[in-house]
Amino acid sequence: MDAQVDGQEEGVSDLVTLGKFLVTWISVGAMVFGGIVPFIPQYRKIRRHRDAEGFSTYVCLVLLVANVLRILFWFGKRYELPLLLQSGIMIATMLAMMHICTAVKLDQVTVSRRFKDFDYQHFWRWTHFADYCYFLVAFSVAGSLVTFLFLGFSLYVELLGFASLLLEACLGLPQLWRNYSNKSTEGMRCQILLMFLIVFGGCCVYSAFVH
């Protein structure tokens, strides 16, 4: 009888362990890839209609800067690798969004604006996709150099993390301003709002089961 009870307990224990394993990996997947899922229908809509006026490209700017800062923060204060991987995937996704936006707007451009012009009045309104890549590389290199110099200062490291979180918290503001300026909600797809819930929920579940 005791052997049978022990066997049942081991079976239940194995099921609980398997359940935790599955939930952990599902939450990790949601945390890594969940943030980019809402942008897929937005990307397809822009490509299908050849119109990016309803989407604020400053959303891409916010996420690019925030995720570069988060990667730099990792060198000063190590956090979970899924979050680091999420940053890399998000950067690639935002570059893809900028590529499609510049591609559909290129036919409507009358005056070419370039990053190398250093005209702050046309910041983030450049004509070619390459200019956004130049900015990302310049920002990443400058941030890396500053981080290398101040990596030993805990205050600087904490400011990096705080700045990244603050920017992500302000993610919706550029799109809200675009909608207010256009007097229309077109371009503000409801799927974007799911990003906060998916990523936040994934982080919570991952923390609960791993820690």
Image: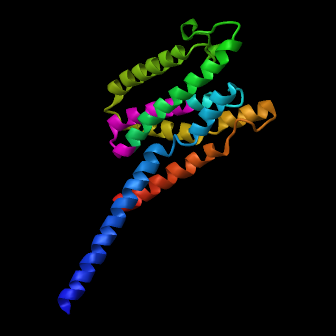
Q: Which residues are magenta?
A: 62-82
Going 33% across and 60% down the picture, which residue do you hit? 21
- Image coordinates of residue 151 in percent, x first then y, are 33, 31
Task: Give the camera-side residue of 83 and 45.
Answer: 45
Is 72 part of what is drawn in magenta?
yes
- Image coordinates of residue 146 in percent, x first then y, are 39, 23
Q: Is residue 54 above or below residue 85?
A: above
Is 177 part of what is drawn in magenta?
no
Task: Give the camera-side residue of 61 and 23.
Answer: 23
Q: Is residue 114 above or below residue 176?
A: above
Q: The C terminus lies in which quarter of the figure?
A: bottom left
Taken as a whole, is the magenta stretch helix, strand or loop?
A: helix
- Total marks placed: 0
Going 35% across and 64% down the picture, which residue do you hit? 20
Image color mode: rainbow
- Image coordinates of residue 203 in percent, x first then y, are 45, 52
Q: Is residue 64 above or below residue 86?
A: above
Locate residue 9 relative to residue 200 in the image: left or right: left
Locate residue 100 relative to residue 54 in the image: left or right: left
Going 38% across and 39% down the picture, which residue do you hit? 84
Corner quadrant of residue 183 = top right
Task: Give the camera-side residue of 4 and 89.
Answer: 4
Asked if residue 124 can be seen in this view, the reply is no
Q: The N terminus lies in which quarter of the figure?
A: bottom left
Going 21% across and 87% down the picture, which residue do you hit? 4
Locate residue 159 relative to residue 50 in the image: left or right: left
Corner quadrant of residue 125 = top right
Asked if residue 35 can be seen in this view, the reply is yes
The residue lying furthest to the bottom in this view is 1
